[in-house]
Amino acid sequence: MQLPLEITYRGVEKTDEIDSFVRDKASRLDKFCDHISRCDVIIEHPNHAQHSGSPYHVRIDVTVPPGHELIVNEKPVKHEMHEPLTKVVNEAFKSMERQLKDLVDRQHQKVKTHAGDDVAVASASAADSDTGS
């Protein structure tokens, strides 16, 4: 499926290298969910006078039918001075991949069950057989 992708740059010069990097990362989202109806990526450099943290913000909005909107907003971290834009984009897409995987698991009801849940079911079954039901 061709992912419907829109990339917006705010205060960041658009380059073929960054554009290609974002498109490559976005195309991987199809591996986690094959029915994405929209993917918007916003890359911005909001404060040019910033002295700590990454100067870039990356926001990814993904819409998945029937009406799910997933949002990742990757912001600067205080202790990581001047991270490259590619690292911030990569982290944002990793977060989106996790969100998509969780959504698909919930949609297919493949959410992990806890060990305690299995024990409770087994105990209830044992109790039923002891009473002769």
Image: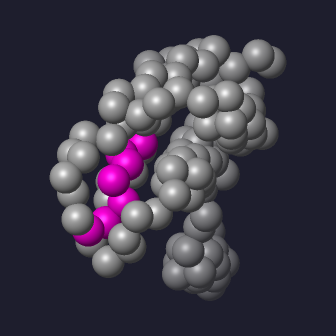
- The relative height of residue 102 versus residue 46 in the rendered view (above or below) is below
> Which portion, as a residue range, is magenta?
52-59
Residue 101, position as x, y percentages in the image: 63, 48
Is 53 within the magenta?
yes
Residue 104, position as x, y percentages in the image: 63, 40
Q: Is residue 116 left or right of residue 1?
A: left
Q: In the image, what residue occupies the spot 51% across and 50% down? A: 85
Quadrant placement of the C terminus: bottom right
Q: Nearer the viewer, residue 36 or 49?
A: 49
Residue 90, position as x, y percentages in the image: 59, 53
Q: Nearer the viewer, residue 47 or 122?
A: 47
Please count the marks in the image.
0
Q: Is any part of residue 39 visible from this angle?
A: yes
- The relative height of residue 66 versus residue 95 in the rendered view (above or below) is above
Quadrant placement of the N terminus: top right
Is 38 within the magenta?
no
Quadrant in which residue 113 is drawn: bottom right
Q: Is residue 76 left or right of residue 97?
A: left
What secondary structure prevails in the magenta region? loop
Q: Nearer the viewer, residue 102 or 39?
A: 39
Quadrant in which residue 12 is drawn: top left
Q: In the image, what residue occupies the spot 26% across and 68% down? A: 52
Q: Is residue 81 left or right of residue 117?
A: left
Q: Is any part of residue 124 visible from this angle?
A: no
Q: Is residue 106 left or right of residue 51?
A: right
Q: In the image, what residue occupies the spot 31% across and 66% down? A: 53
Please say which color scheme the image uses.
Answer: one colour
Q: In the image, what residue occupies the spot 43% across and 26% down? A: 9
